[in-house]
């Protein structure tokens, strides 16, 4: 019998997840179907229960349901517990659900596996303190970096994220908060980062975070967690400031999907060809 999987969201028609998982299934010889589910916000929990009650095996969760999914599940993975959000639902033996969050591992694997970035000893700046930033914190702290600065327009919100990971094993990495307006300003904020990750929503409006070019160390990389058919505003900003590499989040999308596929099927698909497929399509 063909196993059933899906991605649930509102809206959902734009999702590339069915294309990605269909490619993974062909590559690995897995008998599964993967579809989209549109759910009204007030019907999310009932829609999930109906899907699994009808024999569904797993769900990916996208906006605006990652936090409701966290509240719905019976069990959290450590990275989902840190994130406070779930993007992967896994059927447990019996009637329970386990929630995981694969966004952060997708980000780290894209940077290291697809682009050759080495986190060891690096200073990393994470822009934003919302759900996207929180979702990648644990894998970043497990990457071997030396320092992680979380910068947000509202300093208190960045400080709250720092406090949320205070008890994590960080391998000795320094984690601190900073106000966005202080970045790169003499005697006020840190400068010279090896990697800057944009986890804000500014790109959705064609803007970029207001930060000084001095936040980039020589040879620094910039990474935008969103993706587009053309370079995102943040990627263009990075290149204009002399970044050595400016990368968007398409690879992260595919890598987080590959982690979900592995959690469901126990097989880790190859991602390079799927990234190329999406990039060329």
Image: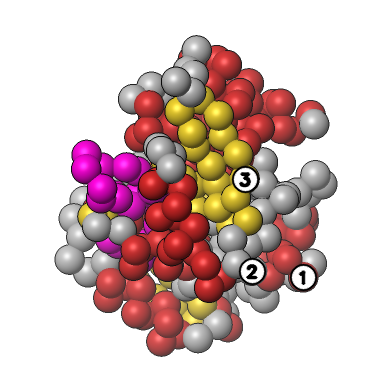
Q: What's the CA distance linking mark 3 and mark 2? A: 24 Å
**Which residue is at the front of the view, 118 or 36?**
36
Q: Is residue 92 magenta?
A: yes
Q: In which quadrant will I find the N terminus? A: top left
Residue located 41% across and 87% down the image: 156
Residue 3 spot, x, y in % from top left: 45, 28
Q: In which quadrant will I find the C terminus? A: top right
**Which residue is at the front of the view, 270 or 45?**
45
Residue 222 appears in the picture as rendered = no
Residue located 79% across and 29% down the image: 280
* Label annotation for residue 205: 1
**Helix, strand, or loop for circle 3?**
strand
The mark lying in front, picked from 3 and 2, is 3
Q: Is residue 239 magenta?
A: no
**Helix, strand, or loop for circle 2?**
loop
Q: Earlier in the sequence, mark 3 or mark 2?
A: 3
Answer above or below: position of 117 versus 235: above
Residue 276 appears in the picture as rendered = yes
**Helix, strand, or loop for circle 1?**
helix
State which region is magenta: 81-102
Find out whether the residues at labels 3 and 2 contact each other: C-beta distance under 8 Å.
no
Find out whether the residues at labels 2 and 1 contact each other: C-beta distance under 8 Å.
yes
Q: Is residue 145 left or right of residue 115?
A: left
Q: What's the CA distance linking mark 3 and mark 1? A: 26 Å
């Amino acid at each position: 019998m063909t196993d059933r999987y899906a991605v649930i969201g509102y809206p959902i028609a734009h999702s590339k997840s069915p294309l990605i998982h269909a490619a993974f299934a062909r590559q690995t010889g897995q008998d599964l179907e993967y579809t989209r589910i549109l759910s009204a916000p007030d019907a999310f929990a009932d829609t999930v229960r109906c899907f699994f009650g009808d024999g569904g095996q797993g769900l990916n969760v996208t906006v605006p349901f990652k936090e409701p999914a966290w509240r719905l599940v019976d069990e959290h993975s450590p990275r989902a517990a840190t994130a406070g959000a779930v993007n992967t639902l896994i059927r447990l033996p019996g009637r329970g659900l386990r929630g995981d969050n694969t966004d952060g591992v997708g980000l780290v694997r894209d940077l290291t596996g697809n682009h050759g970035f080495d986190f060891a000893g690096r200073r990393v700046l994470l822009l934003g303190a919302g759900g996207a930033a929180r979702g990648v914190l644990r894998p970043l702290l497990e990457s071997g970096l030396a320092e992680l600065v979380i910068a947000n327009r509202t300093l208190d919100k960045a400080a709250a994220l720092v406090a949320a990971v205070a008890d994590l094993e960080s391998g000795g990495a320094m984690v601190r908060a900073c106000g966005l307006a202080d970045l790169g300003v003499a005697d006020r904020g840190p400068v010279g980062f090896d990697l800057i990750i944009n986890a804000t929503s500014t790109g959705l409006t064609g803007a970029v975070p207001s930060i000084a070019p001095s936040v980039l160390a020589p040879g620094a990389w910039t990474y935008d967690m969103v993706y587009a058919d053309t370079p995102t505003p943040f990627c263009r900003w990075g290149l204009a400031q002399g970044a050595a590499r400016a990368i968007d989040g398409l690879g992260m999308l595919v890598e987080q999907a590959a982690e979900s596929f592995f959690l469901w099927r126990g097989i880790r698909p190859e991602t390079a060809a799927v990234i190329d497929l999406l990039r060329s399509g």
